[in-house]
Amino acid sequence: MRIMAEKIKNTDVLFNPFSKNNPVVVQVLGICSVLAVTAKLEPAIVMGISVIAVLAFANVIISLIRNTIPTNIRIIVQLVVVAGLVVIVDQVLKAYAYSASKQLSVFIGLIITNCILMGRLEAFAMGNKPWPSFLDGVGNGLGYAIILVIVGFFRELFGSGTLLGYQVIPQWCYDNGYVNNGLMILPPMALIVVACVIWVQRSINKDLQED
């Protein structure tokens, strides 16, 4: 029974951030990067993968050393760990995905200040073992990435008529008067798309609705 309870708990830790406890549409964290990197689908995907990697490994590292971190400098230690991982991710992107790295520009570096990371390190990794911390990092990273991909999908599709740079809306639509919605590639539309996602998500999860 104890093993089963632990498995259920770990399952909840991994999957709850996908919907019921999503860091973007429920906790309203990481909104700045949602506005900045979702005009195209490719940088949204790369940003999501980068955050998953940094958050998962940062959670594990902090969990491993949590009992040796002095309380008064714990935030500094967390920032140093995240910064080191972000530098590694940035160098990997420059080496193997240079075009995506160029599109993301400074936003990869700004993962260091992403409130999702600092929140999970402080709220979860500092008080839990490495494996649950890893699952928490992967779960919250995926929850964040899912929203980025959804927003990036609709913004690129309706704003540029493409997905991952490939033309999706056929040429005959343009020949018959269809015009791309230029507003979709502007940052305010990211907020509107996120608002629509929040509306759908709360319609599905009735327990999140406010009385």
Image (cartoon, helix red, strand yellow):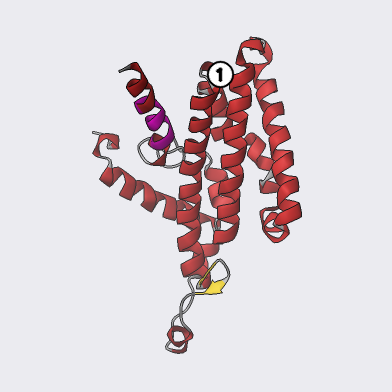
> Is 10 within the magenta?
yes
118 shown above or below 171: above
Please give the name of the residue rendered at 63% of the width and 25% of the height, measured from the top-left corner.
Answer: 61
**Residue 41 in the figure: left or right of residue 109:** left
Please give the name of the residue rendered at 50% of the width and 68% of the height, measured from the top-left corner.
Answer: 159
Please give the name of the residue rendered at 27% of the width and 37% of the height, measured from the top-left corner.
Answer: 209
| Majority SS type along the magenta span | helix
Viewer-side residue, 196 vs 80: 80
Q: Dot 1, crowdedness within 10 Å: few (<14), some or many (≥20)?
A: many
Check disc 1 and report its element: helix, strand or loop.
Answer: helix
Question: Where, quadrant-wise, is the N terminus in this rendering?
Answer: top left
Q: Is residue 39 visible?
A: no
Residue 94 screen position, x and y as percent:
75, 53
Please give the name of the residue rendered at 37% of the width and 46% of the height, measured from the top-left corner.
Answer: 198
The amino acid at mark 1 is Met
Viewer-side residue, 191 vs 33: 33
178 shown above or below 10: below
**Residue 90 in the figure: left or right of residue 141:** right
Q: Is residue 12 visible?
A: yes
Viewer-side residue, 93 vs 77: 93
> Is 101 within the magenta?
no
Question: Where, quadrant-wise, is the C terminus in this rendering?
Answer: top left
Residue 192 screen position, x and y as percent:
43, 54
Which quarter of the figure has residue 54? Answer: top right
**Number of labelled discs?**
1
Residue 143 screen position, x and y as percent:
46, 42
Residue 160 screen position, x and y as percent:
53, 71
133 shown above or below 195: above
Judging by the rendered image, the residue that carries numbered circle 1 is 126
Chain part drawn in magenta: 8-15
